[in-house]
C-alpha cells in the first residue's frame, strides 16, 4: 500500500471529512453504549433530545458552544502556524481570573462598553502572556511547546485554586472555593430571556469572522500561512518567523483567554477550579474537526456542545455514564485525523 | 535549614523517593522506547490512566496483582497499536494523534470504571503490593530501608533500566531501534522494515507506560479515581528530553524528580504559612526548568516525528 | 551471443507514478565483472530503475532476475540476500551512530543477544584493506568527510557479500581526484569478479570508467553501446535526444563593481564557513563560483540572501554595507536571490502561484495591511506570460509545477523588478536541458541589461559557459579570479583542489 499525494484538495472531500469522522465515532461508540445495556438508538435519540429537545436544551447547547468557539479558534490559529498550543485550558482560566479580579472593583466606575473592553483586553492579555512563555522558550531555547503548554495547564489550575482560596475568595460562599462574583452590572445580557444563553456567542461568532478575514485577506495572514506551510521558504522570502510566531501566540492565547472572560461575565459570574469541563482540550477537537478553518470552528463547536449537553441528559435518562461524551469526542478527533489524510492523499495498491 | 537536612537524611524519605519514582521510571522508559524509534507518544497520559484503571479493575475482580499488571500492559499495547497505526503507516501528525489517544484512553478508562464499578462515598479499594525486603541486603543500615525494602514492581523498574540500557547498545534489535529513530531510510536500505520496528516499539513503549499507571493503583494507592495520573505522563515526556534519551539518565531524572516531590511533601508539613498549591506547582515548574536547561544540548533522535513513507524523501 | 548467463537481467520493467511513466518497458543485462554505465538526464528514470532493482519500489510490470532467478519485487531484503548492494546518492547513513553500527545493522538476526562488535570490526578492517577503502569502524559517521561516508556505503554492500554493486551518481559529491580514485577502486572490484552499475550524467566519467553504456531517455532505453565503440558527442546526442544548444555568452565590457566583498568571514558550528573571502561582481558581469559541494557555497548564498551575518570583513552593494540586511531589506534594495533549493527555500509548494509570486514583495501589493488580491494575481499573470511559465495559472498550487517552470517563476519574480545584483545559487540543478537553456538565456539577458550576477554552480560546463570570470571555493576560501577564457579543465581542477598560484590578499592592494 502506498500513498500518493492528490493534485489538489477537493473542497467536497474537506466538507465530507468531518461528517464521516463523526459518523465513524458514533458507530464505534454504539458498542460501548450497548455494553451498558442500553440500545444505542435510544441513547443517541436521548442525546439529541437533551441537546435540542426543548427551548432550554437548545439555549444550553449554544451556551456551551460559546467558549468552545473561542478555544477552538485559539487552537486552529496556532496549529495553522505549527504552534502546538495545548494550553488552551490554562489560558481560559487566566482570562477568567483576569475578568474576576477586575470585574468587581474599579472597572465598575467606567461606562459599560468601555468596562467590557477593559475586561476583555485584560483577559486576552492574561491568556496571551501565558502562551508567550512557551512560545519564547521554544524560540530562545528550543523547548518543545507541547510539553510546556501542557505542564502550564496544571500550574494555572493550582494558581486558580490559590486565588479563589486566597485573595479572590468569596467570603459569602459558605467556604466554597470560589471567587468573588463580578458586579451584576457587568454581566453580559441574555440573548434569550430566562435562559443562560448570553450575547457572548454573538461576540464569539464576530471574532471568528474577523479572524477569518485576517487569515485570508491580510499580509499577516499570508505570512502566517507561508510560515506554517514551509518555514524555510517563508524566511527566505523575508517573512520574520520569530515575530510571526510571537504574534500568533499572542492571538491564540488571547482568544482562549477571551473564552474565559465571556464564561465569567456570561453564565457563571465567578471563577472556580471546576468551571471549565475541559474547554481548552475540547478546543483541540473542535479545531481538528474544523480542519483548522475559522468558519468550520463554529459548526464543530456546536457539535461538541451537542455531545456534551446531550450526553448529560441522556445519562440521567438511561444511566449510561456521561463520560461517553468524552469518548465520542476523542474518537471523532482520531477519525477526523485519519479522514484528513484521505483528503490530501489517495491510496494506491 | 536544619529541618530540611533532617528530612534528607531520613531513610524513609529515600524509600518514598523510589516509590514515587517507580511509575515515572516505567513511563519515561516507555516514552524513551517510542522516541528512540522516532515516534513521539503523547498518548502517555491517557495510557497511564487506562493502565491504572485496568490494572486495578483486574485485581478488584479477583485476579492477583501481577495479572493486573499484565492486563494493564496489554491494554497499553492496544492503545500503542492504535497510535502506531495512525502515525506510522498513515504518517499522521504525532502530536495530534497522541493527544487524541490521551483523550480517548482516559475517557475510556473513566467510562468503563463508571460502568463496571459501583462507587459509594469512597472509591472501592484492593489489597495493594506490600514492600518486600530483599533477604540480606535489607539488613544494611540506611540503604536496607531506603533501597531494599520496596514493592516488587519497583525492583522490576530498576531491572528494566539496566536491561534496556544493555539492549539498546549491545543487541541487534536495540541497534535497529536506534537506527530507525535516526534514519529509517538507512534501516530500509539494509533490508529491515523501519515501519514494522516503529509499530512494535510504540506498542512496547505504551505497554511500559500502562505499567507505570498500573503501579499507581496497585502499589502507590489502592483505588482508582479520575485525574489520578495528574500530569505524570507529561512529566515523563519532559524527563526523556532531560535524560537525552538514555535509560541511565532517565532513571536519574526520575529519582531526582521524585526526591524533590517527596521532599516538598514533607516540607509542607513543617513549613507554615505557604499555600499548599505553591508546593504542588513546583514539580511542573521544575520539569519546565529541566527542559530549558537541557533543550539546546539534547541530542534528539534525528528522525523523531518524521513519518517514513517508502519511496519518499 | 556467446555471453555466459548474465548475473543480472531486467526484463520489461515498467513503473508509473500517477500520470508519469518513469520506466517504460526497460530491459538490460549485466555480465560478471562488467562495469555498466546508466546514462541519462535528470528525470530520465535512472534512479527509479535502480530503486526497483534494489526493491525500494515494486515495478508495475516486468521482472528482475539475478543469476537467472526471479527476484521478489519490492523488498530490499531479498535484493541484499541475492547479492545486490546499492550505494544511494543521498547516503542512507545515521550520522549519530558509528561506522560499525551503520554497517552491521541488518546483517544479523534481530534477536541475537550480541552485536559481536569485535568480530564485525575485524571483518570491516579486512574488507577495507582488500578493496582500498580505509575507514575507522569506531568513528561516528557524522564526523566523516563525504568521501569517507561513501566508503562506508560501499563497505555496507560488501559486508553483506554483494556481487552486484549499484552506485547512484557516485561522483555528485566528490572532487575530481576523489572521483578518479573511486573509479580505480571500482575497476579493481570488477576485475575481482564484482559486477557494477553506476548511474551518471557526466560523459567523461562514462567514457573513462565503463565497459558498456545504456542510455535512458524519458523512461525508455534509447541506446546501448560498447564504450570502446562510441564517443562523447554521440552519447550526448543520445542522452538529450535533440540538439539543444545552450545560449552563448556575448563578449561585452563590464561596468564598475556593484557588490564588493573584502575579508568576508562567516562562522558556522564552531568553524569558519567563509574565511576571509574577497570578490567583486561588476555591472553587466557574471562571476562564477565553482567548487565541490559543501565548501561554503551554501553560506555564501545565505549571507547574500540576508539570512546569515558575517563575523568579519565587509560586503557592500553599491557602496552600502549589506552585511546586516534582512531578506526583506535586500529585496527592497534591488537584490535578486535565487535560492539553492527550489522546493525547500524557493517556493511554498502548497500556496498558489500568485502568492509565491508576491511573497517577497507583499508590501507592494497591499494597502492598510490587506493584500490587494486582484493586483497580486495580475502581477503573477504577467510573470507567467513574460517568463513562459507553462502549466500554470495564478491560482495553481505551486508544487504542481515542473522543476523548470518553478525555477522560471523564481527567476521571474526576481528579474521582473530589474535587480542591480542577482545571486543565482545552483540555478539549474536538477533541470532538463530545455529548462537549463531557458534559465541560461534569462541570466544572460539580465547580464546584458547591466545586472551584476554572482553564479554559484557545481556544474563546470555551466559556470565556464556563463561566467566572465571564475573563482573557486575550497573549504570556505576563495581563489583569485581568472577570466573564463583561461579556464581549462586542468586549471579548474587545480583551483577546485585548493591549489592556486597567487596567495590571498595581494591583488586588491590597488
Image (tube, grey):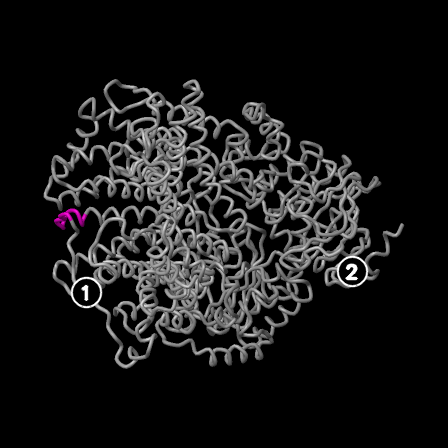
Q: In this view, does A40 lie above or below C240?
A: above
Q: What element carries label 1?
A: helix
In contact (CB < 8 Å): disc 2 and disc 1:
no
Q: Quadrant of residue C271?
A: bottom right
The answer for how far apart the CA atoms under marks 2 and 1 are is 79 Å
Q: Position of residue B105 (x, y in %)?
A: 27, 50
Based on the picture, tell me whether residue C214 belongs to the magenta stretch.
Answer: no
Residue B91 makes an appearance in the image: no
The image shows residue C343 at horizontal and vertical percentages of 55, 45
Residue C77 horizontal side relative to residue C359, left or right: left
Q: Name the mark on residue A74.
A: none
Between marks 2 and 1 in the image, the one whose residue lies nearer the viewer: 1
Number of dots carrying numbers: 2
Tell me the subunit letter for badge 2.
Answer: C
- Asked which quadrant contains residue A34, the reply is top left
Q: Dot 2 lies on which element?
A: helix
- Residue B70 lies left or right of residue C63; in this view the side is left
Q: Tell which of A326 and C108 is nearer to you.
A: A326
Residue A70 visible in the shown view? yes
Give residue A273's position: percent from left, percent from top.
31, 40
10 Å neighbourhood of mark 1: few (<14), some, or many (≥20)? Answer: many
Q: Mark 1 lies on which chain?
A: B
Spot occupied by residue B248 in the image (x, y as percentages of width and height): 42, 68
Q: Give the range drawn in magenta.
A: B112-121
Q: Do labels 2 and 1 share a chain?
A: no
**C211 left or right, relative to A164:** right
Which residue is labeled 2 in the image?
C491
Closer-to-camera residue (A197/A15): A197
Is residue B117 one of those drawn in magenta? yes
Figure quadrant of residue A63: top left
Image disc number at residue B65:
1
Task: Please say if B289 is above or below A91.
Answer: below
Amino acid at each position: 500500500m502506498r500513498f500518493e499525494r492528490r493534485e489538489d484538495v477537493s473542497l467536497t472531500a474537506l466538507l465530507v471529512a468531518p461528517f464521516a469522522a463523526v459518523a465513524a465515532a458514533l458507530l464505534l461508540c454504539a458498542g460501548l453504549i450497548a455494553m451498558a445495556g442500553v440500545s444505542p438508538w435510544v441513547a443517541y435519540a436521548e442525546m439529541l433530545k437533551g441537546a435540542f429537545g426543548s427551548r432550554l436544551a437548545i439555549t444550553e447547547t449554544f451556551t456551551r458552544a460559546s467558549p468552545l468557539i473561542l478555544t477552538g479558534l485559539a487552537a486552529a490559529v496556532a496549529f495553522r502556524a505549527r504552534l502546538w498550543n495545548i494550553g488552551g485550558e490554562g489560558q481560559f482560566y487566566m482570562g477568567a481570573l483576569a475578568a474576576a479580579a477586575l470585574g468587581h472593583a474599579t472597572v465598575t466606575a467606567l461606562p459599560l462598553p468601555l468596562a467590557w473592553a477593559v475586561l476583555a483586553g485584560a483577559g486576552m492579555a492574561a491568556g496571551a502572556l501565558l502562551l508567550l512563555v512557551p512560545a519564547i522558550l521554544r524560540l530562545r531555547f528550543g523547548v518543545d511547546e507541547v510539553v510546556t503548554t501542557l505542564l502550564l495547564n496544571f500550574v494555572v489550575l493550582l494558581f486558580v485554586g490559590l486565588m479563589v482560596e486566597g485573595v479572590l475568595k468569596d467570603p459569602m460562599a459558605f467556604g466554597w472555593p470560589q471567587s468573588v462574583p463580578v458586579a451584576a452590572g457587568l454581566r453580559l445580557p441574555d440573548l434569550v430571556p430566562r435562559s443562560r444563553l448570553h450575547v457572548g456567542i454573538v461576540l464569539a461568532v464576530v471574532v471568528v469572522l474577523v479572524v477569518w478575514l485576517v487569515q485570508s485577506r491580510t499580509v499577516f495572514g499570508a505570512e502566517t500561512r507561508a510560515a506554517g506551510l514551509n518555514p524555510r521558504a517563508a524566511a527566505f522570502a523575508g517573512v520574520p518567523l520569530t515575530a510571526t510566531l510571537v504574534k500568533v501566540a499572542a492571538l491564540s492565547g488571547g482568544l482562549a483567554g477571551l473564552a474565559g472572560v465571556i464564561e465569567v461575565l456570561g453564565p457563571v459570574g465567578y471563577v472556580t477550579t471546576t468551571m471549565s469541563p475541559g474547554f481548552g482540550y475540547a478546543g483541540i477537537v473542535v479545531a481538528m474537526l474544523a480542519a483548522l478553518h475559522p468558519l468550520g470552528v463554529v459548526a464543530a463547536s456546536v457539535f461538541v456542545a451537542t455531545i456534551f449537553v446531550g450526553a448529560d441528559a441522556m445519562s440521567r435518562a438511561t444511566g449510561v455514564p456521561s463520560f461517553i461524551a468524552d469518548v465520542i469526542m476523542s474518537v471523532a478527533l482520531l477519525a477526523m485525523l485519519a479522514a484528513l489524510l484521505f483528503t490530501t492523499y489517495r491510496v494506491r495498491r | 535549614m536544619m529541618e530540611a537536612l533532617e528530612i534528607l537524611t531520613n531513610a524513609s524519605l529515600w524509600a518514598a523517593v523510589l516509590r514515587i519514582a517507580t511509575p515515572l521510571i516505567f513511563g519515561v522508559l516507555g516514552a524513551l522506547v517510542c522516541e528512540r524509534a522516532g515516534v513521539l507518544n503523547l498518548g502517555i497520559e491517557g495510557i497511564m490512566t487506562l493502565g491504572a484503571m485496568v490494572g486495578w479493575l483486574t485485581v478488584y475482580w479477583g485476579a492477583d496483582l501481577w495479572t493486573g499488571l499484565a492486563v494493564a500492559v496489554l491494554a497499553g499495547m492496544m492503545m500503542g497499536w492504535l497510535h502506531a497505526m495512525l502515525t506510522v503507516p498513515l504518517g499522521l501528525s504525532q502530536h495530534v494523534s497522541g493527544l487524541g489517544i490521551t483523550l480517548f484512553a482516559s475517557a475510556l478508562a473513566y467510562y468503563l470504571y463508571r460502568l463496571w464499578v459501583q462507587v459509594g462515598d469512597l472509591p472501592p479499594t484492593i489489597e495493594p503490593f506490600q514492600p518486600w525486603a530483599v533477604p540480606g541486603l535489607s539488613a544494611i543500615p540506611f540503604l536496607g530501608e531506603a533501597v531494599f525494602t520496596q514493592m516488587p514492581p519497583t525492583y522490576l523498574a530498576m531491572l528494566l533500566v539496566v536491561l534496556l540500557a544493555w539492549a539498546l547498545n549491545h543487541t541487534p534489535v536495540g541497534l535497529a531501534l536506534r537506527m530507525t529513530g535516526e534514519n529509517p531510510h538507512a534501516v530500509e536500505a539494509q533490508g529491515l522494515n523501519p515501519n514494522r520496528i516503529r509499530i512494535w516499539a510504540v506498542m512496547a513503549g505504551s505497554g511500559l507506560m500502562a505499567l507505570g499507571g498500573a503501579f499507581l493503583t496497585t502499589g502507590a494507592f489502592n483505588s482508582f479515581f479520575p485525574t489520578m495520573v495528574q500530569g505524570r505522563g507529561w512529566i515523563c515526556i519532559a524527563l526523556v528530553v532531560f535524560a537525552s534519551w538514555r535509560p541511565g539518565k532517565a532513571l536519574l531524572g526520575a529519582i531526582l524528580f521524585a526526591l524533590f516531590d517527596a521532599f516538598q511533601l514533607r516540607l509542607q508539613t513543617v513549613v507554615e504559612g505557604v499555600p499548599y498549591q505553591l508546593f504542588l506547582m513546583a514539580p511542573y515548574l521544575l520539569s519546565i526548568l529541566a527542559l530549558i536547561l537541557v533543550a539546546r544540548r539534547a541530542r534528539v533522535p534525528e528522525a523523531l516525528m518524521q513519518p517514513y513513507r517508502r519511496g519518499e524523501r | 551471443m556467446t555471453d555466459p548467463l548474465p548475473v543480472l537481467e531486467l526484463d520489461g520493467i515498467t513503473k508509473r507514478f500517477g500520470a508519469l511513466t518513469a520506466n517504460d518497458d526497460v530491459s538490460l543485462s549485466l555480465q560478471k565483472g562488467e562495469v555498466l554505465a546508466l546514462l541519462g538526464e535528470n528525470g530520465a528514470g535512472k534512479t527509479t530503475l535502480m530503486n526497483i532493482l534494489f526493491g525500494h519500489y515494486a515495478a508495475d510490470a516486468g521482472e528482475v532476475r539475478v543469476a537467472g532467478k526471479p527476484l521478489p519485487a519490492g523488498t530490499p531484503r531479498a535484493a541484499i540476500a541475492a547479492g545486490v548492494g546499492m550505494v544511494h546518492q543521498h547516503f542512507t547513513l545515521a550520522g549519530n551512530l558509528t561506522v560499525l553500527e551503520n554497517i552491521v545493522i541488518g546483517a544479523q538476526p534481530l534477536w541475537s543477544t550480541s552485536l559481536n562488535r569485535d568480530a564485525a570490526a575485524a571483518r570491516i578492517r579486512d574488507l577495507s584493506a582488500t578493496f582500498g577503502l580505509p575507514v575507522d569502524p569506531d568513528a561516528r559517521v557524522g564526523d566523516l568527510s563525504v568521501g569517507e561516508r561513501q566508503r562506508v556505503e560501499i563497505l555496507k554492500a560488501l559486508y553483506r557479500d554483494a556481487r552486484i554493486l549499484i552506485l547512484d551518481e557516485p561522483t555528485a559529491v566528490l572532487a575530481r581526484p576523489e572521483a578518479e580514485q573511486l573509479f580505480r577502486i571500482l575497476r579493481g572490484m570488477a576485475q575481482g569478479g564484482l559486477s557494477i552499475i553506476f548511474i551518471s550524467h557526466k560523459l567523461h566519467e562514462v567514457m573513462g570508467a565503463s565497459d558498456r553504456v545504456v542510455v535512458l531517455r524519458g523512461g525508455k532505453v534509447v541506446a546501448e553501446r560498447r564504450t570502446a565503440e562510441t564517443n562523447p558527442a554521440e552519447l550526448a546526442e543520445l542522452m538529450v535526444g535533440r540538439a539543444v544548444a545552450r545560449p552563448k555568452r556575448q563578449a561585452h565590457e563590464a561596468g564598475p563593481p556593484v557588490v564588493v566583498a573584502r575579508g568576508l568571514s562567516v562562522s558556522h558550528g564552531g568553524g569558519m564557513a567563509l574565511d576571509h573571502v574577497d570578490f567583486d561582481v561588476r555591472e553587466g558581469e557574471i562571476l562564477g563560483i565553482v567548487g565541490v559541494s559543501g565548501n561554503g557555497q551554501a553560506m555564501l548564498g545565505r549571507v547574500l540572501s540576508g539570512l546569515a551575518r558575517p563575523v568579519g570583513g565587509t560586503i557592500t552593494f553599491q557602496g552600502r554595507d549589506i552585511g546586516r540586511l534582512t531578506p526583506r531589506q535586500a529585496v527592497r534594495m534591488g537584490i535578486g536571490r535565487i535560492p539553492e533549493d527550489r522546493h525547500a527555500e524557493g517556493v511554498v509548494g502548497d500556496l498558489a502561484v500568485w502568492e509565491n509570486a508576491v511573497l517577497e514583495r507583499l508590501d507592494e501589493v497591499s494597502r492598510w495591511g490587506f493584500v490587494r488580491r486582484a493586483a497580486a494575481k495580475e502581477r503573477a499573470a504577467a510573470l507567467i506570460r513574460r517568463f513562459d511559465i507553462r502549466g500554470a495559472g495564478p491560482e495553481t498550487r505551486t508544487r504542481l509545477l515542473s522543476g523548470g517552470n518553478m525555477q522560471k517563476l523564481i527567476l521571474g519574480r526576481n528579474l521582473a523588478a530589474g535587480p542591480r545584483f542577482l545571486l543565482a545559487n545552483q540555478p539549474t540543478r536538477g533541470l532538463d536541458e530545455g529548462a537549463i537553456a531557458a534559465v541560461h538565456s534569462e541570466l544572460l539577458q539580465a547580464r546584458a541589461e547591466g545586472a551584476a550576477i554572482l553564479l554559484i554552480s557545481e556544474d563546470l560546463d555551466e559556470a565556464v559557459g556563463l561566467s566572465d570570470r571564475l573563482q573557486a571555493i575550497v573549504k570556505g576560501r576563495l581563489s583569485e579570479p581568472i577570466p573564463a577564457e583561461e579556464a581549462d579543465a586542468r586549471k579548474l581542477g587545480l583551483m577546485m583542489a585548493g591549489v592556486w598560484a597567487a596567495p590571498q590578499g595581494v591583488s586588491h592592494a590597488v
